[in-house]
Amino acid sequence: MNGPMILPWIAHKAGISEARAEELWREALCHATDTTGWVGTSEYWKAAEDKLHKLIEREVQSNCLPTPELGTWVRLQSRMAHLPLLLAESWSVAWIRLLSAKPL
């Protein structure tokens, strides 16, 4: 089943995959068939399009994460994870400088 040609653009704009947009399109077509009872009429396509937009809006809302807070938390965790490595690097550099400064 082919979706509308604009479906990839709608998916990209909403931030969902094209495959998920096609699943939502199929769901919208099933809803339009149930609602109108006829396939291919202008009412059918209008119902399918309206349902698609509602489904995509619902999908976007369900995928919303508190990005600023999440991003801050991820950056903090990344910095904390790198601290032991930075400490080890600093100690090894200091140790090498200490050994190279002393004549044996």
Image (cartoon, grey):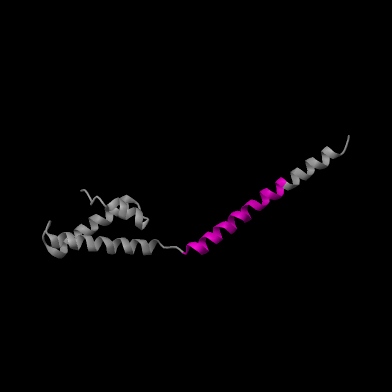
Q: Say which quarter of the image contains residue 99.
A: top right
- The residue shown at (52%, 64%) is 69
Q: Say which quarter of the image contains residue 35.
A: bottom left
Q: Position of residue 100 (x, y in %)?
A: 82, 37
- Side of 33 relative to 90 (left or right): left
- The residue shown at (24%, 58%) is 27
- The magenta stretch is 66-89
The C terminus lies in which quarter of the figure?
top right
- The residue shown at (51%, 63%) is 68
Question: In this view of the protein, which residue sits in the foreground, 85 or 43?
Answer: 43
- Side of 60 relative to 31 (left or right): right
Q: Position of residue 25 (x, y in %)?
A: 25, 56
- The residue shown at (23%, 55%) is 26
- Side of 62 relative to 74 (left or right): left
Q: Does the magenta stretch mainly form a helix, a strand or a loop?
A: helix
Q: Say which quarter of the image contains residue 29.
A: bottom left
Q: Position of residue 40 (x, y in %)?
A: 12, 56
Question: In this view of the protein, which residue sits in the foreground, 12 or 65?
Answer: 12
53 within the magenta span: no
85 within the magenta span: yes
Identify whether 12 is placed above or below 51: above
